Structures are given as C-alpha cells and as structure tokens.
Image (cartoon, rainbow, N blue to C red):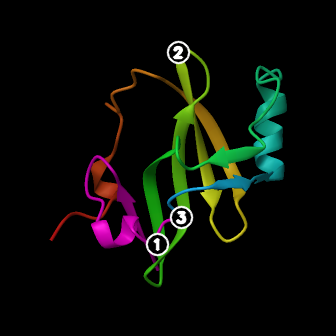
Amino acid sequence: MSKLYHSNIYFPKELVNQLPQNGSHLLTYSFHSKQIHVSRGGRVTQLPQMIDLTVATPIEIEVIEGKPYKVLYRLPFNGSEDICLAILLSRWFVKTFWFNDRNDNHLTLNPKKYQKGQ
C-alpha cells in the first residue's frame, strides 16, 4: 500500500532527503501525457525534455515500501504559469502533467488524501 505526502501538509525530512537533490535528468513521457498535450490543442510547443532539480520543487511524494516512488515536481514554465510533472523516479517517466497559475493558493487541496505528522 502506498502513502501520500504533500508539502503543504506534512513532508518528513527523512523522506525528502531520499529524493534526488540535484542534477538534470532526461524525461520520457507516457502516452497519456502525450495525449493531454495534443488534446489541449498543442498549446505547449515543447514539453520539457529535462528536469533540473535545482529549480524543481517537490510538492507531493508517493511512497511504496518506505521509498519514494512518484514525485510531483513544480517548476517555472513561463511568466505566469508553472508546470507540474508527476514523475516515476525509477525511470524519470512523466505519468501526467498540468499547468498551475504561478499564484495558485491550493484552495482545492484535499488534506484527507495525505499523511499527517506524528
């Protein structure tokens, strides 16, 4: 069974320390991600091919058997939006992505989905 953590609710330091901390990684995209790109009219001319962990912020971590499995990273995209990439860490595989307004305040965040602090 997996556990889900969100940076606005509870991010255990020992869990965050298990995440890759720096460097750039080549991304591959799921069929689903590519379909989203097409279904939105190709609004994005180029999806990021790499993720630079010095500018990406982990927002959500899914943990399986005590290890980070999937991480939602948020990073700047343009002057008004950020791109959120849900990435399987084992192969830097983007399951899905979406855009958030840079000033999004997460009013729709459902805290019941996430682990709470001890």
Q: Are marks 2 and 3 in contact (CB under 8 Å)?
A: no
Q: Which residue is mark 3?
A: 20
Comparing 40 with 48, the one in front is: 48
Q: Position of residue 8 (x, y in %)?
A: 28, 46
The mark nearer the N terminus, 2 or 1, is: 1
Per the rendering, the mark at residue 80 is 2
The mark nearer the N terminus, 1 or 3, is: 3
Comparing 58 with 113, the one in front is: 58
**Gap between marks 2 and 1, in whole Å?**
31 Å
Range shown magenta = 1-19
Q: Are marks 1 and 3 in contact (CB under 8 Å)?
A: no
Please name the residue shown 38% across and 64% down the image. Answer: 16
Please name the residue shown 73% across and 67% down the image. Answer: 91
Q: Is residue 16 magenta?
A: yes
Q: Position of residue 61 (x, y in %)?
A: 45, 61
**Gap between marks 2 and 3, in whole Å?**
27 Å
Q: Nearer the viewer, mark 1 or mark 3?
A: 3
- Asked if residue 33 is positioned above or below residue 13 in the image, the reply reads above
Q: Residues within 10 Å of mark 1 (few under 14, many from 20)?
A: some
Mark 3: which amino acid? Pro
Q: Which residue is mark 1?
A: 63
64 left or right, relative to 15: right
